[in-house]
Amino acid sequence: MQEVVKALVDRHREQVIKRLPTYMSAEHFFQLCRELDRDPKIRRVAERNPDSVMSAILKSADCGLLIGGPFGHCWIAPFGEEVALLIGWRGFVFQWIHAGAVLKVVSNCVYVGDEIEVIAGDTEAINHRPSLTDKNREDPKWIANKDNIIGSYAIAWLPTGLKQYRWCSKGQIEMARARSQNASGPAWTHSYPAMAAKTAVRRLDGLIQVCGPTEQNKEAWDRYARTIELDRKQFDHVPDEKPDDLPGQSTGRVGPPTGATAGTEHDPSPDPPPPHSEGRKRSVTGPSLVVRDPEPEPEDAELITSEQQDQAMELMSAAGMRSSALIRYVNDTYNVPDIAQLTTAQAAELIVELGKRAKAK
């Protein structure tokens, strides 16, 4: 086996070492880089386009993440004559822990047959009872099939003793996939459960706002800022969108002061939606939708269900509409930042409208 990547990394050894964080072993990092030679596709790109492979390795060093291996921080994936650095949800958690932001994080997918209870309000909780006796769990193909996943969640334990929760329905996961520049790439097609779990972890981003007092804590938080900025570039979004499942949208952080206080169990107040002005026109991709002034909803109105979100996403696809166009329509029509904030009544209206557009296509 040719050691193309090993030779490439060895030539840039000093440059890589300068970029690595102080809390990471250089030899461990280089050992995992050498393992990339085992992948013939990556080795072929390294021969023809060494700058692409070296750029991805340097980005992982800048972020302070280990490539591949059992840690799951990040991966290098070949795309034709180039490679891309893909961030895993355990990479975010690794940096949160080193920054003193969390004690631990768990993220899981919820499958057909599981019992899931999501409690919102003053006392938040997620109670998940997997169907462990289901024989389907013995089939790796069944586990990897996205049709068997109904959602995902993430729970973070903070140093304050509080917890933060995020639940993502199948519709929200598919919306994140629709925004991804590699929606049909190997990560989403071959590792859907991991990407579903990552979507839930990414949505914790705006709820974790703490950095420990040590220099290592501050360094890890800075590496985390670089990581979420890199991950955001892999998603399509327009400047005036602020979807909360894209990392870094809530803060645009450059790092909090040492010892910053963690948030409470409640979500931080979202940015107010842009005011609805009469006669405003916005260009959208896909079929045009009529914008109307929203009817006031009662304060205790029930939010959109997972089934409604899934149906809306299916009809959006059938109508040939991009997710950015749907988000703009929801924002203009109902004055909410995204589909997850719709009430059940508003969601029913949206589904009817999308159904009409899908039939007319």
Image: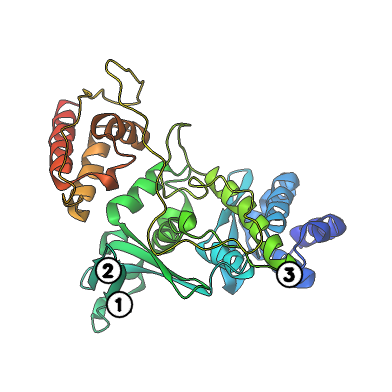
Q: Nearer the viewer, residue 229 or 85?
A: 229
Residue 149 spot, x, y in % from top left: 29, 63
Q: In this view, does 120 lie above or below 279?
A: below
Residue 169 spot, x, y in % from top left: 29, 57
Where, quadrant-wise, is the N terminus in this rendering? bottom right
**Which one is earlier in the sequence, the residue at label 2 or at label 3?**
3
Residue 310 spot, x, y in % from top left: 23, 50
Q: Tell me the mark number nearer the camera, choosing from 2 and 3.
A: 3
Q: Which of 55 and 159 is in front in this view?
A: 159
**Which one is earlier in the sequence, the residue at label 1 or at label 3?**
3
Q: Quadrant of residue 143?
A: bottom left
For the point 25% across and 67% down, the residue is 119
Q: Is mark 2 on a helix, strand or loop?
A: strand
Q: Tell me the mark number nearer the camera, choosing from 1 and 3.
A: 3
Q: Are marks 2 and 1 in contact (CB under 8 Å)?
A: yes
Task: Specify whether 42 is left or right of 4.
Answer: left
Q: Look at mark 1 in the image and give the residue it sits on.
A: 137
Type of amino acid at the residue the image marks with label 1: Arg
Q: Look at mark 3 in the image and give the residue it sits on.
A: 24
Q: Look at mark 2 in the image and give the residue it sits on.
A: 111
Where, quadrant-wise, is the C terminus in this rendering? top left
Q: Is mark 3 on a helix, strand or loop?
A: loop
For the point 26% across and 76% down, the residue is 136
For the point 15% across and 44% down, the residue is 298
Q: Is mark 1 on a helix, strand or loop?
A: helix
Residue 38 spot, x, y in % from top left: 66, 65
